[in-house]
Image (cartoon, rainbow, N blue to C red):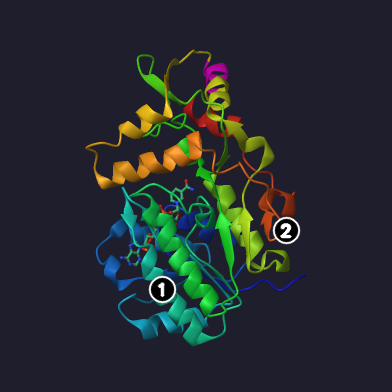
């Protein structure tokens, strides 16, 4: 049996981080999870960490305010996966990772670093709208630091997390399907291909990729073929499953962008990201080339969650 690398997850109690810790444990890796003293009395974070410990993870105390502690943590692992926050309406700390990159450089033992990306490929988002462009620009700053330090890496482009985009039929400001009297906004006819991915599958594919030579210094796109569909197809799938027609209202690109006006930064960032996904089609309007890889082709043994299976929970 191939030797499984030792994995350190930084940001392990977070939304995607906890799935990555779970996948690392499930796939039999020695798993370390950073435990930050700053979490203090956050009982829920502590409970999550203790539940990882119960499942066999080792908690490693370290702080972004103590660089030596980060170096010590990194030295324990072959692979470091960072799931630092990067959503404007939750918390956005992508650039903090520069300290982690420094720690990895100093430690010198890490065979693979996976920075916090897990969304649109920032390298393809050069002309993104303000203020949401901040996410992509900061992720590119982190990439540059990784590459300047010659740190072996893999970038994961995970497309639309199902939790944020599927149950709500890709609506902003809600996470659940519409009630009978709610309208569903259809973006510019709803005919642009997007990619929906269950977060647990993001964890599974990410962990599969870390010991794989085929993904070394590459971007791995998670683009499971049956989950590449248009918003219109998603809505039709929900109507079929629920047995109810939803009220649809079509919105032009111009009107959608105009809806940014007067909104706070987090909402404007969200509108910008939705525009790139649902009007411009940034997730699926390109071929995955030789310099990258696609997760479901690399790991056909993974039975990924189909969108219609994901929707069942809302019935
Ligand atoms: N594709 C999509 O649809 C999608 C959706 C959402 C997010 N994302 C991406 O996924 C990545 C992770 O986002 P997320 O929503 O999972 O993040 P999150 O849950 O908001 O936060 C993740 C972790 O970041 C750490 N963190 C936050 N502030 C910190 C600070 N000041 N110092 C040290 N650590 C701090 C915490 O780690 P501890 O566990 O140590 O407390 C936290 O649990 C981001 O790159 C984001 O852009 C993609």
Q: Is mark 1 within 8 Å of ligand 1?
A: no
Which of the two discs, 1 and 2, labels the residue nearer the N terminus?
1
Residue 268 visible in the current orientation: yes
Q: Residues within 10 Å of mark 1 (few under 14, many from 20)?
A: some
- Which residue is at 39% across, 34% downward? 175
In the image, residue 241 lies in the stretch drawn in magenta: yes
Q: Residue furthest left?
A: 262
Span shown in magenta: 238-242
Total labels: the figure holds 2
In the image, residue 220 lies in the stretch drawn in magenta: no
Q: Quadrant of the N terminus?
A: bottom right
Give the labeled residue for mark 1.
Answer: 98
Nearest the eye: 259 or 52: 259
Measure how far apart labels 1 and 2 are at the Cα level: 28 Å
Q: Nearer the observer, disc 1 or disc 2?
A: 2
- Which residue is at 54% across, 46% downward? 159
Residue 32: give x, y in percent of width and height: 50, 71
Give the answer, above or below, for where 142 lies relative to 123. below
Residue 103: give x, y in percent of width and height: 44, 81
Q: Secondary structure at mark 1?
A: helix
Give the labeled residue for mark 2.
Answer: 290
**SS majority, magenta:** helix
């Amino acid at each position: 049996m191939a030797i499984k690398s030792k994995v350190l997850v930084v940001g392990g109690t977070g939304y995607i981080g906890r799935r990555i810790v779970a996948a690392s444990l499930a796939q039999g890796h020695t798993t370390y999870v950073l435990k930050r003293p700053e979490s203090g009395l956050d009982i829920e974070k502590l409970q999550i960490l203790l539940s990882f410990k119960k499942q066999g993870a080792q908690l490693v105390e370290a702080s972004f305010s103590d660089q030596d502690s980060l170096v010590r943590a990194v030295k324990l692992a072959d692979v470091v996966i960072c799931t630092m926050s990067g959503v404007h309406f939750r918390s956005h700390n992508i650039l903090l990772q520069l300290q982690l990159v420094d720690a990895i450089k100093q430690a010198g033992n890490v065979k693979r670093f996976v920075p916090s990306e897990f969304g649109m490929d920032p390298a393809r988002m050069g002309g993104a709208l303000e203020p949401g462009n901040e996410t992509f620009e900061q992720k590119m700053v982190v990439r540059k630091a990784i590459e300047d330090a010659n740190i072996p890496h893999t970038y994961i482009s995970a497309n639309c997390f199902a939790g944020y985009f599927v149950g709500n039929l890709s609506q902003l400001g809600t996470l659940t399907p519409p009630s009978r009297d709610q309208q569903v906004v259809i973006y510019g006819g709803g005919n642009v291909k997007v990619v929906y991915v269950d977060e647990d599958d993001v964890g599974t594919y990410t962990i599969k990729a870390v010991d794989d030579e085929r993904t070394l210094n590459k971007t791995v796109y998670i683009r499971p073929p049956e989950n590449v569909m248009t918003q219109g197809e998603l809505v039709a799938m929900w109507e079929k499953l629920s047995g109810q027609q939803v009220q649809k209202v079509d919105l032009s690109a111009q009107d959608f962008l105009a809806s940014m006006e007067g909104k706070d930064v987090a909402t404007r960032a969200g509108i910008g990201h939705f525009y790139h996904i649902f009007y411009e089609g940034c997730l699926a309007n390109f071929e995955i080339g030789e310099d990258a890889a696609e997760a479901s082709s690399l790991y056909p043994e993974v039975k990924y969650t189909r969108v219609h299976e994901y929707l069942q929970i809302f019935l």
